Amino acid sequence: MSTLAGQLFVGLASLGSVATLVACTASGTAPVRASTIAQSTIEQTAAKQIGERLGGGTYTVACPHDLPARAGASMVCVTTFPDGEKFNGTARVTSVSDGKAGWTYDADNVQDK
């Protein structure tokens, strides 16, 4: 799996063609400012990559705050699909070097409605 490509596995449930997310990964690098990765950078990049992989509609990612720029730091965010279905996801810092932080976002747990 390349860092920018990620992998995607989607299963379809039979009830009303509701998509059940099994795993969807986004990733990127971001400049570190004030020892954090901007919340908006993770939200926008992850939503765009998930939308490109799944195609069609608007996907959103909502995170509670900026992510501390230290390897292993993580936070739980919520991915919302075009049909309104929500999934938890984890944003995690994978590396920090030369003023940039590598990160991943894994959306793979169904959130209770």
Image (spheres, rainbow, N blue to C red):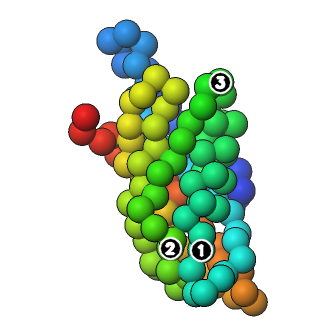
Kindly identify which numbered label has been placed on residue 37.
1
Callout 3, which amino acid?
A: Gly
- Label 3 neighbour load within 10 Å: few <14, some 14-19, many 20+: few
Q: Is residue 86 left or right of residue 56?
A: left
The residue located at (66%, 28%) in the rendering is 55
- Label 2 neighbour load within 10 Å: few <14, some 14-19, many 20+: many
CB-based contact (under 8 Å), mark 2 and mark 3: no
Q: Quadrant of residue 30?
A: bottom right
Which residue, given by chain and number where applicable, does mark 2 sit on?
67
**Is residue 71 visible in the rendered structure shown here?**
no
Q: Percent position (x, y) of residue 66? A: 51, 71
Q: Is residue 8 left or right of residue 12?
A: right
Along the viewing direction, whichever of 8 and 90 lies nearer the viewer: 90
The residue located at (60%, 60%) in the rendering is 40
Which residue, given by chain and number where applicable, does mark 3 sit on?
56
The span from disc 2 to disc 1 (Cα, nearest Å) is: 5 Å
The span from disc 3 to disc 1 (Cα, nearest Å) is: 28 Å
The residue located at (54%, 42%) in the rendering is 60
State which tag comes first along the sequence, 3 or 1: 1
CB-based contact (under 8 Å), mark 2 and mark 1: yes
Q: Percent position (x, y) of residue 57? A: 61, 25
Q: Percent position (x, y) of residue 43? A: 57, 54
The N terminus lies in which quarter of the figure? bottom right
